[in-house]
Each structure stands twice: as C-alpha cells, then as structure tokens.
Amino acid sequence: MITTQDLLDAIGAHGERTYPEECCGFLLGEMGPEGNRVVALHPVENRQEGNRERRYVITPADYNTADRAARAQGLDIVGIYHSHPDHPARPSETDLAEATFPGYTYVIVSVKQGRAADLTAWTLAPDRSRFESEPIITAAAQPA
Amino acid sequence: MSTTITQTTVFIPTPLRAYTDKNARVSVEGSTVGEVLSNLVTQYPSLKQHLYDEKGNLRQFVNIFRNDEDIRHLERENTPLRAGDELSIVPSIAGGCGA
C-alpha cells in the first residue's frame, strides 16, 4: 500500500487509545495498478462482545456507514486495520479464518504495553490459503 | 400477455471489481436474490469463489442487503426483487490476535 507516515501514526495512536483492547477501522483511498493508495482512515468501534483484548468485529452496519463516508469523499474502502495488543503484528489463525476478500489491504499494528510498535500490511492470497506480506510505501501527503 | 424481466443493480465491493471488469455496479436479471446472484456469477465466473464456499453456500462473512435490509431478515436467497431494488454485497469483518 501507498500511504503517509501521518496515517500510519494515526493507526498506532488509535491502537494506543483502545489498549488493552483491539482497535479497528477502515482504510479509505483507491485501488490502482501500483497497489492500494490509502489517503484517509475511518475508525470504528470494536463490536466484539467480550474478549476485545483478543478479538475485533466490524458489523455490516458500520461497513455501510464507512462506505457512504468513503463515497462522499470520492474514495473507496481499500482495506481494514486492527491492533494486536501485546502480540506480534502478524495475521493470526483467527485473522485468516475470518478473512474477507483478496484485494483489501489488512494493516496490523502491534501495541506493546500501551505503546504502538511494529505496523505491517498484508493481503489475502487469491486462493484464500494465507496472508501475503504487502510492502508499505510512505509518500509525502499530496496537496488537496 | 407480457413478461417483465426484473433488472437489479448489484453494488460490487472495491476488491471484487477486479472480477467484474472494474464495474462498481452491475445490472443483473432475476426475480429473487438467489437468481440474481446466480446470474451474476455466471456472468463473472471468477467472482464465484469469493462469494460462495466449496459447498455452494454463500460464505459466512458475505452479507447481502436488499436496499437497506439484510436478506437473512427477509427470505434469504428466496427474497423477491422488484424493479428498482438494489443489492449490496457487504462483508462482515472480524479477526484479532487470539482464538
């Protein structure tokens, strides 16, 4: 994915605010031949009932709200982010079991003892068998 | 006697547009949700594996909305469609570091 350091920092900051629970949200931007360009975030509430330290859920209603917000800005939902409190920034078996569509960028930020640490990006393989690492390219914010 | 063929607009989530010739919305014939989805994946065969599991059921995380209503609260894939209805494919998203 192509994004800015400010947005990566904002994902980490969200993970710090919800620590020790997982945070989650949408990556908004556009899908292009060079990859997913992320230009805005749409944070959402973790709707998991209980065990939010280890699980997150985003409801279809929250997806629809995010989709409308994206389209109002001329953007699309291009991915999802969430945090792993005191766990590595790698997709878990749960992440793979719950994965949606190949093509989304899945960002994971590790939050260690309340501080944002590693941040990684992944994409689901077309055959859904595994997550593949996706490079993160940071560019200067484009003028509006 | 005239036969009315209902055309329904199906909204395609961004990553699945790779399989619909980049179309964000596709007009599909059918009088029920199931018929429209079946015709959709006939029209775009590479879409099928992302919407249906190996047993031919809609994947667990795939939700279909008729206008603003989840078809699970209607008649699921037998939900009837009228002219002007719109279908959205909406993923349930979940995960996390623990089981």
Image: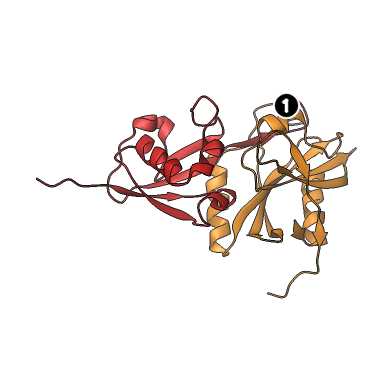
Chain colours: A orange, B red
Residue A90 vs B13, above or below: the answer is above
Q: Give the residue furthest to the bottom.
A: A143
Q: Residue at x 39, y 30 (%)?
A: B76
Q: Nearer the viewer, residue B71 or B52?
A: B52
Mark 1 belongs to which amino acid? Asn
Residue B23 vs A21, above or below: the answer is below
Q: Nearer the viewer, residue A26 or A90?
A: A90
Crowd tier of the residue under label 1, counting other residues whose Cα lies within 10 Å: few below 14, some 14–19, many 20 or above: few
Question: Residue A81 placed where, x, y %?
Answer: 72, 46
Q: Which residue is mark 1?
A: A51
Residue A129 vs A25, above or below: the answer is above
Is residue A31 visible from the viewing direction of this image? Answer: yes
Q: Tell me the quarter of the image containing the N terminus of chain A.
A: bottom right
Give the left or right position of residue A83, taking residue A73 as reference. right
Q: Nearer the viewer, residue B97 or B17?
A: B17
Give the left or right position of residue B57, taking residue A138 as reference. left
Q: Tell me the quarter of the image containing the C terminus of chain A.
A: bottom right
Question: Residue A80 placed where, x, y %?
Answer: 68, 46
Query: Mark 1 belongs to which subunit?
Result: A
Is residue A57 visible from the viewing direction of this image? Answer: no
Dividing the picture into quadrants, the one containing residue A113 is top right
Question: Residue A100 placed where, x, y %?
Answer: 62, 38
Classify mark 1: helix, strand or loop: loop
Question: Residue A76 placed where, x, y %?
Answer: 59, 57
Q: Residue at x 81, y 35 (%)?
A: A20
Q: Residue at x 54, y 49 (%)?
A: B19
Dividing the picture into quadrants, the one containing residue B35 is top left
**Numbered disc total:** 1
